[in-house]
Image (cartoon, helix red, strand yellow):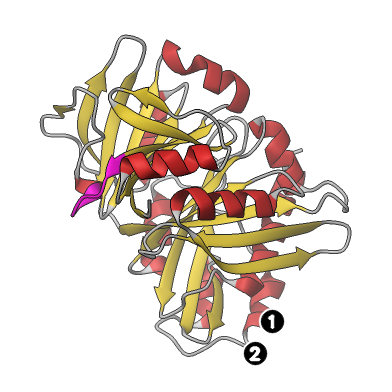
Amino acid sequence: MAVQDISYVELFTQDKISAVDYFVTAMGFTRVADAVEVDRSSVLLRQGGVQLVVTSGRGIWKFLDIYGDGIADIGVTCDDVAATGAAVVAAGAGPVVTVRGNTVVPGFGGVTHTLHPAADAPSAVPPSGRNWVPTPDGPAGAEGHIELLDHVAVCVEGGRLGEYADYYRDAFGFSRYSSEYVDTGGQAMDSIVVRSASERVTFTLVAPDPGKDGGQLDAFLERNGGPGVQHLAFLVRDIITAVRDCRERGVEFLTTPASYYDALADRLQEGPFTLADLRQAHVLADHDEWGQLLQLFSRSPYERNTLFYELIQRLGSRGFGSSNIRALYEAVQRDRLSAG
């Protein structure tokens, strides 16, 4: 029943034109195919080992009414589709349904997982069940920097973090990779990272501490109509160049206070970028026993201010920036408060 890879991530949006333009123009994806169905239409985008589907139409309005623009489906490949479906049922997660000839199972909130047989290059195979038509001379984005989907961050209800981690263990064969609790005084967030045995699918599950004051995660859950994908983390080769190019093409990133870099000076490991480079780009830096991690988070480009994106570069690091979790939390909190 083990899950092997993420084959694609599907975004439901009320404005497909703007959403596609953001990915192509600002983030460097290439439009490769289109599919038109009775009640919806989709665009297939690719960059590196990442495949995105952007969908709009009257057939998805129920999702949009509840959750707004956001990730609706994360397609995964698995060793045995039938066995994984049976494991989902055994875990008590709800019904397994067939959509376009594919097995679809519950994930979290309104997000589902479409199951596909394991493939050698899943991110190069269009999602099955749709009549994809190659986009003639599809507009390529500017130079792309994204290589892989490093991880998916999922926000769930406070007090239920362990339930979701157990579900992905029992139904998908994931294991708990790490956990982190960040207390900022009046507010706190808890997290568990779950990962497939292949190590190619990683979900970072985050939840507010229900015993603390409401904060940004509570606000996300309210705006999003419940649990959902908080952000997608894209692995890049050179984060300074990637941030510069994406920023110049329209991606808005969160800002990092100068005090962060004053404190970073004492713990920054030697690497390809200087403290001045990181400060100028607002990139966060952390390290673990394996190496250095560099990351930066975008503002949400969507009306409800929910889903956003991360650029991440790993210089040996296998972690998720433990000391940066607090910095991210505080940065998002400042951005939320400044936006009213």
Amino acid of disc 1: Ala
Residue pointed to by mark 1: 263
How far across and down, in percent of the image, does residue 3 sit?
A: 37, 53
Magenta range is 116-122
Q: Nearer the viewer, residue 233 or 119?
A: 119
Look at label 2 and name its amino acid.
Answer: Asp
* Magenta residue check for 121: yes
Q: Which mark is residue 266?
A: 2
Residue contact between numbered discs 1 and 2, judged by CB atoms under 8 Å: yes
The residue drawn where x is 87% and y is 53% is 212
In the figure, 5 relative to 295: above or below? Answer: above
Looking at the image, can residue 19 be seen? Answer: yes
Number of dots carrying numbers: 2
The reply to whether residue 8 is in sight is no
C-alpha gap between disc 1 and disc 2: 6 Å
- The quarter of the picture where residue 144 lies is bottom left
